[in-house]
Image (cartoon, rainbow, N blue to C red):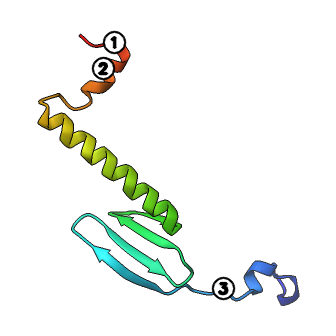
Amino acid sequence: MTPSSKSPSSTSTAHECVKTRLAESAVAAVDLSDCGVMYLHLGALTLRLAPSVLSELLATLGEAVAMHACQQAAGEEPLAWITRLQYGDS
């Protein structure tokens, strides 16, 4: 390939976003880039998310954890509510 036939993407200069670690635990880490993207690292998996999406994910996970805690406090088997929905209360 001659220099004049390079594709536009190979000749453009890409901005490398700088990331700052916001939080880290034994199972996860969260970085914020100067581009406004948040990176959620879970082991080998990394999700790039808008801050609003990460916030919504946090709310959903919090709801799931609260539901699980309520089920455990009531002595229910995990996911027993799914069985009740499928087959009715018995």
Residue 43: image location, x then y, percent = 32, 63
Q: Horizontal and vertical percent for residue 57? A: 42, 55
* Looking at the image, residue 68 lies above or below residue 46: above
Residue on which disc 1 sits:
87
In the depicted view, which residue is nearer to us: 31 or 76? 76
Label for residue 14?
3
Disc 3, SS: loop
Q: Which residue is mark 2?
A: 83
Disc 1 residue type?
A: Tyr
Q: Residues within 10 Å of mark 2 (few under 14, many from 20)?
A: few
Task: Name which of mark 3 and mark 1 comes first in the sequence.
Answer: 3
Marks 3 and 1, Cα distance to the nearest angstrom? 55 Å
The kind of residue on which mark 2 rests is Thr
15 or 50: which is nearer to us? 50
Q: Are marks 3 and 2 in contact (CB under 8 Å)?
A: no
* Label 1 to label 2: alpha-carbon separation: 6 Å
Vertical placement of residue 26 versus 57, above or below? below
Q: State yes or no: discs 1 and 2 in contact (Cβ < 8 Å).
A: yes
The local secondary structure at tag 2 comes to helix
